[in-house]
Amino acid sequence: MKCRRCGHKASINMRQHKLALCKDHYLEWILSQTERIIGKYKMFTHQDQIVVAVSGGKDSLALWDVLSRLDYNVEGLYIGLGINGGISYSTKSRSYCEEFANLQKSKLNIVEINKELDNTIPELSKQSSRGRGKPCSVCGLTKRHIMNRFAIDKGYDVLVTGHNLDDEVATLFNNTLNWSTGYLQRQSPVLESTHPGLIRKAKPFCRFYERETAAYALLRGIQYIYDECPYAVGAKSIYNKALLNRLEVDRPGAKLSFYLAFLKAKEEGFFTQKGESNINLLNTCPSCGGPTTVIGECAFCRMVTKVNQGNK
Ligand code: SF4
Ligand code: ZN
C-alpha cells in the first residue's frame, strides 16, 4: 500500500477515510485534522490558556503533544488516584506523564487525591455508599470535581480531554440503548460553561478512531502506559467497544457516521427539550462554590460529607 500524498510505503491505511499515508504525511494529517476539528467546533483559540487532563495513556499524551506542536498554550494536569492494586497503576501512570512533560519541557500540574482528601480512590469508595464495590462511580465523580475545581481556581479558559471517537461512540451507544436523554443532550465535542464555577470543556480528538491516536503515539515515539486501570476489567464501556468494533469490521466508517449523524441530529434540535433547556439551570454548591443540578451541596460534597460523618 502506498501513501496517497507521496507514493512512499504507507504506514497506516484508514479504510473509513479510504486514505493510506506514510509516517510523515500521517503525522501531518493528524495535526491538520485536529486544527480543523478545533476550528469547526470553536473549541479554543491560540489566545486561550488550556489545561489537558493526562492519565499517562496514549490519547491524553498524544493530545498534549499535538496541541504543543500546534503552538497552543497548554499545560498538563495529572490526578493521582492512589490506585496501586497489583500493577501500581497510579505510580506508573504518573511517571509516564512526568517523563513526557520533562521531554517536552512543558508544565505538568499534579493533584494527589490522597493529599487533597486524606483518602485514595479505593479507600474513599469503600467508605462511600456509591458504586456497590467498584470504585468507578466515586472515581469519576471525584476526577470531574477536581479537574473542574483546578481549572477554575487557576484561571484556565478551557479543560481538554483525550476522548477519542471509540470512547464517544461507546458512550453514545450506551446512552441510546437507555434513551438517557439528559446525557444525550450533554454529549458534545464542546461543553460550554453555564455557571461561573464550571470550566468550558473540549474534546479535540473526538473524531479520531482509537487506532489513529495509537498510531500517532507510536509514530511519534511517545511512551505511555499500556495497562488499563485494574478496575476497568468487566466495564460496560469495554463490552460496548468490542461490539462496536465488530460492526466496524463489517462496515468501515460505521462508528464515525453514527457519531456524526448524532451531532447533526442534535444541531437540528432533536435532543432539545420543549421550552427552556434545563442544562442551563445550575445552582451553586454552598460548600465548594461549584455547579450543581440540585439545591444544596453538589454530589461530590455530599459524598465527602457522608464519608466524614461515617468516620466520626
Ligand atoms: Fe477510575 Fe479505574 Fe474506574 Fe477508570 S476504571 S473510573 S480509572 S477506578
Ligand atoms: Zn460542592
Image (spheres, grey):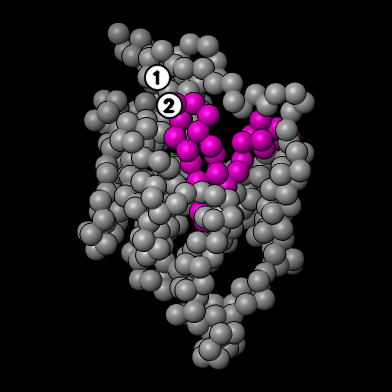
Q: Is residue 47 magenta?
A: no
Residue matched to label 1? 289
Q: Is residue 49 above or below residue 127?
A: below
**Which residue appears farthest toward the front when viewing the image?**
47
Say whether residue 226 is left or right of residue 2: left
C-alpha span from label 1 to label 2 = 6 Å
Magenta part of the protein: which range? 177-205
Q: Is residue 24 above or below residue 184?
A: below
Camera sees residue 117: yes
Q: Is residue 199 magenta?
A: yes
Q: Earlier in the sequence, mark 1 or mark 2?
A: 2
Ligand 2 neighbours mark 1 (CB distance < 8 Å)? yes
Residue type for callout 2: Gly
Say whether residue 278 is left or right of residue 70: right
- Residue at image x 47%, y 67%? 31
Q: Tell me, yes or no, whether the two marked residues, 1 and 2, touch with CB atoms within 8 Å.
A: yes
Residue type for callout 1: Gly
- Residue at image x 46%, y 17%? 284
